Amino acid sequence: MSKKIKQIKQLIKKECEKNNLDEFYRYHLLEVEKNALKLLNKLPEANNELVMLAVWLHDLQRIRQLEGDHQQVGVREAEKVMEEYNFSSENILLVKDIIHSHSCAGLTPTTLEGQILATADAMSHYTSDFFLWIATRGERNLEEYKEWALEKLDRNYNKKIFFSFAKKAIQKRHDALMQLLESK
């Protein structure tokens, strides 16, 4: 990982700590990084730097607790950070494109790097205590939580995971979570 990306990772960690999002950092961002590295290992033709920049910048809207569309605000904030670290305008545009489609809600990633971020993001929800952490936050009652989680699981598994080997890796966890949440 380049020096600039390490610095951005530290910036994001500090912003998470400042905004009381230590669990988000631990249960989501570190898991996205771990999964992205595994995917990059299997897909060496991808641009490692672009993916890792997108990993650390893709959730800035949530981290900075800003109002507005998750992807649009996130793209704007990522651009600011990348400009501060003197990334080329070409790389800024590429990372913005990766971030803009990472949720696969309306837009689908068109690049390998975008597909890697979307997949790593979705996988992170299975490879950590993400769903338990969200459940303990008390933002939804049980029925609302189940409805939200089932929709998220469906989108994660069926729209965000672009590689069959990645789907296979989380299939048992997906099936177990679906079974648990669909029970009455």
Image: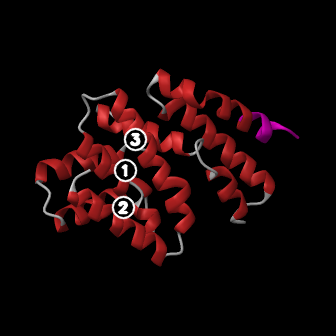
- Mark 1 in CB contact with mark 3 (< 8 angstroms): yes
Query: What type is the residue that disc 1 sits on?
Result: Val
Mark 3–mark 2 distance (CA, rounded to whole Å): 22 Å
Query: Could you tell which of marks 2 and 1 lies nearer the N-terminus?
Result: 1
Label 2 CA crowd tier, 10 Å (few <14, some 14–19, many 20+): some
Position of residue 52 relative to residue 112, above or below, is below
Q: Position of residue 52 (x, y in %)?
A: 31, 48
Left or right: 167 as drawn, with respect to 49: right
Q: Count neighbours of disc 3 (C-alpha within 10 A) and say few if under 14, some if 14 to 19, many if 20 or more.
A: many
Q: Quadrant of the image for the C terminus?
A: top right
User: Left or right: 142 with respect to 26?
Assistant: right
Residue found at the far top of this picture: 164
Q: Which residue is mark 3?
A: 36
Point 37% across, 36% down: residue: 116
Q: Is 182 covered by the magenta stretch?
A: yes
Marker disc for residue 128: none
Disc 2 versus disc 1: distance between alpha carbons?
16 Å
Please state the horizontal and vertical placement of residue 94, each as a whole percent of the image: 21, 45
Residue 63 sits above or below residue 101 on the image: below
Q: Earlier in the sequence, mark 3 or mark 2?
A: 3
Does residue 132 sit above or below 47 in this rendering? below
Q: Residue flagged by tag 3: what amino acid is it?
A: Ala
Disc 1 is placed on an element classified as helix
Q: Which residue was labeled with disc 1?
A: 55
Residues under numbered marks 3 and 2 in contact, where contact means CB atoms less than 8 Å apart? no
Query: Judging from the image, what secondary structure is the residue with disc 3 in?
Result: helix
**Magenta-drawn segment:** 178-184
Determine if residue 103 is in view. Answer: no
Disc 3 vs disc 2: which is toward the camera?
A: 3
Task: Kindly identify which residue carries mark 2.
Answer: 73
